Image (spheres, grey):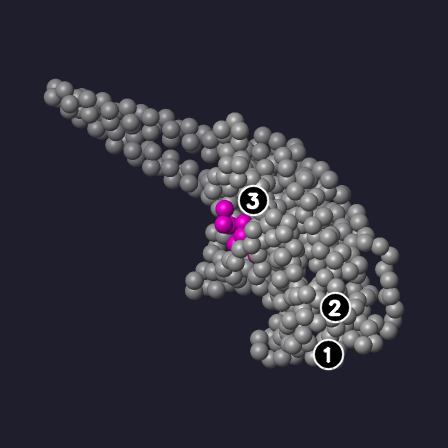
Amino acid sequence: MLSIDKISNDKEATLIGLKKRGFKNLDVIDELIKLNSDRKQIQQKLDQILFESNTISKEIAEIFKSGNQSNNVENLKSKSAELKSKSKDLSDQLDKTKSSILSLITTIPNLPDKDVPEGLTVNDNIEVFISGPIKDSNDSLKNHWDLAKELDIIDFELGSKITGSGFPVYKGKGAKLQRALINFFLDKNTSAGYTEFQVPHLVNSESAFATGQLPDKDGQMYHVKNDDFYLIPTAEVPLTNIYRDNILSNDELPVLLTGYTPCFRREAGSYGSDVRGLNRLHQFDKVEIVRLEHPENSNHALSTMKDHIKGILSELELDFRILNLCAGDLGFTSAITYDFELFSKGQKKWLEISSVSNFKTYQSNRLNLKFKDKDGKNYLLHTLNGSSLALPRVMAGLIENNQTKKGIKIPKALIPYTGFDIIN
């Protein structure tokens, strides 16, 4: 979340950033500034009363120590009781004011980076890279759900029977291809310096809040009410929370983490052709990369993450492009995001397969995640994450884009992982 002091001290820049995103409730900024001013005044009064109370306690102790008690002791005790009552009232006011600040500030999204394009819709996103001209996109190519049924590698109807729509069952070489992609992605990430973790697939509300899923995405997450646990929408949540409430040294930076998990999303409100086949699922597999970076290095780290994912997609021989998302299309917690999209030749459209984002201090403020810099002071870290990669649409692209008369051709880089070079 944004820093209340940054909002108070730099109101104009905050408003400019929020307007760029198309954020409507700008009145909340003045309300927060007023609450923060009230908080400071209450805190000052409380500190003064606590100081007076401590001073009186010391005076009483000295009187008893000297053995020269007088009527003044009772007066001091009475004053002490009065101050304790006032301090309790002020503490209650302070807690209420802090709660009001937290409730309001969590409704405010991150401010967009200076390199984020202007605009409010997907049409304003800017293409910054394309792998090359799109080849072999003709009318005879089939979509992946028809191919999967013909080859008996993914069963959407069986998934609907077992659970419901959006929960496919992978079979035979389809299951092996899934496993091959997971291992391939993890190996590429660990070779690039990321440490692999196996993390829980459920998190508590504190973890979901710390990375920004709560309260913003509450309705999109599966909630286990009896235990107050949430099924993770991405490995980003447990991976980043490994370092919640930590203070790292400069020598420990950067921190690079990767992990494979299933991901669970309700995707409420999704409909139409975008949800056909593997395009949008309630449960899917994804390999994630997360970085904790010194603020001075996070922009370079984001560029490194982009290059890393470009290399993976090139090895998979997929046609893809990279978009710099406009301010209005940014995720709630992101300061800047680059989307990777592959071209689906069977569906003849672009499909998002990865996002790499720099959250700057937005998550670390919630996480209470800091580092001790060379000056000995503690500062908030920058957090970054990316899909490396999400499997469903990569699978869709591989199936559609590699279809031949003999079957689905497997890219050379994956053959050591699959153990076969064609699905037929």
Can you say which quadrant of the picture contains the N terminus? top right
Q: Amino acid at mark 2?
A: Ile
Q: Which residue is mark 2?
A: 410
Residue 322 x %, y % = 76, 51
Instruction: Tell which circle, 3 or 1, labels the residue nearer the N-terminal end.
Output: 1
Q: Which residue is mark 3?
A: 255
Q: Secondary structure at mark 2?
A: loop
* Disc 3 to disc 1, C-alpha distance: 42 Å
Which region of the structure is painted magenta? 235-243
Residue at the image point whose x is 79% and y is 67% from the top: 401
Query: How would you rate the neighbour count of disc 2 (Cα within 10 Å): few for under 14, some for 14-19, many for 20 or more?
Result: many
Q: Which mark is residue 278?
A: none
Residue at the image point whose x is 88% and y is 69% from the top: 138
Query: How would you rate the neighbour count of disc 1 (Cα within 10 Å): few for under 14, some for 14-19, many for 20 or more?
Result: some
* Disc 3 to disc 2, C-alpha distance: 34 Å
Residue at the image point whose x is 73% and y is 40% from the top: 115
Q: Which residue is mark 1?
A: 151
Residue 280 inside the magenta-drawn segment: no
For this view, does 199 lie left or right of residue 134?
left
Q: Amino acid at mark 3?
A: Val
Residue 24 x %, y % = 66, 45
CB contact under 8 Å: marks 2 and 1: no
